[in-house]
Amino acid sequence: MIKLDFKDGKSLHEQIEDGFKNLIINKILAENEQLPSVRELSLTLTVNPNTVQKAYKELENDGFIYSIKGRGNFVAPVSFTKDSKKINELYDNLESSIKALIYLGEDADKIDEFIKKVKEDM
C-alpha cells in the first residue's frame, strides 16, 4: 500500500500523505472507502501513531479524506464545489515548478508533452 523511505529528506507524515494522495488520485482507493485505523497503519509502517494522525489530519484539511468520530477515516467523494483557495495554491506550485524546469534548461515542448501525458493517464 504505502512504502516509506526512512532515508528520504521528506518527513514520514508527508510520505504517508503523498502515498494516500497517489492512491486516491489514481482511484486505487474508492470514494467512501475506509482507511486503516491510525493504530493499524502505525504498526504496519512501524511509525509513531502521532505521525499517522498528523498525515490523516493534513489529508482531511486538503479534502482527500473525511473522518467520522468513532468509525474512522474515509476517502472523500470528489467534490463538485471547487475549493478556489486550494486550486490557486496548486496553480502557484505548478507555476513555480514550471519556472524552475525552464530555468534548469528544460525544453518547453517537453513540459507540454509531460502535461499531456499526465492528462492521458488520468
Image: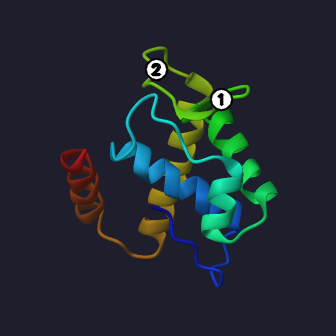
User: Where's the C terminus, which quadrant?
Assistant: top left
Q: Which element is circle 2 on?
A: loop
Answer above or below: position of 58 versus 75: below
Q: Nearer the viewer, residue 95 or 12?
A: 12
Q: Amino acid at mark 1?
A: Arg
Answer above or below: position of 44 versus 112: below
Q: Which residue is mark 2?
A: 79
Answer above or below: position of 8 versus 79: below
Q: Residue furthest top?
A: 81
Residue at (27% x, 52% y) in the render: 118
Within 10 angstroms of label 1, few (less than 14), some, or many (20 or more) residues?
Answer: few
Q: With 81 as the anchor, is 58 left or right in this view?
A: right
Q: Earlier in the sequence, mark 1 or mark 2?
A: 1
Q: Nearest to the eye among marks 1 and 2: give it.
A: 1
Q: Which residue is mark 1?
A: 71
- Quadrant in the rendering for residue 40: bottom right
The Cα–Cα distance between marks 1 and 2, rounded to whole angstroms, is: 22 Å
Q: Nearer the viewer, residue 64 or 119?
A: 64
Rendered location of residue 28, percent (x, y): 34, 47
Answer above or below: position of 4 versus 2: below
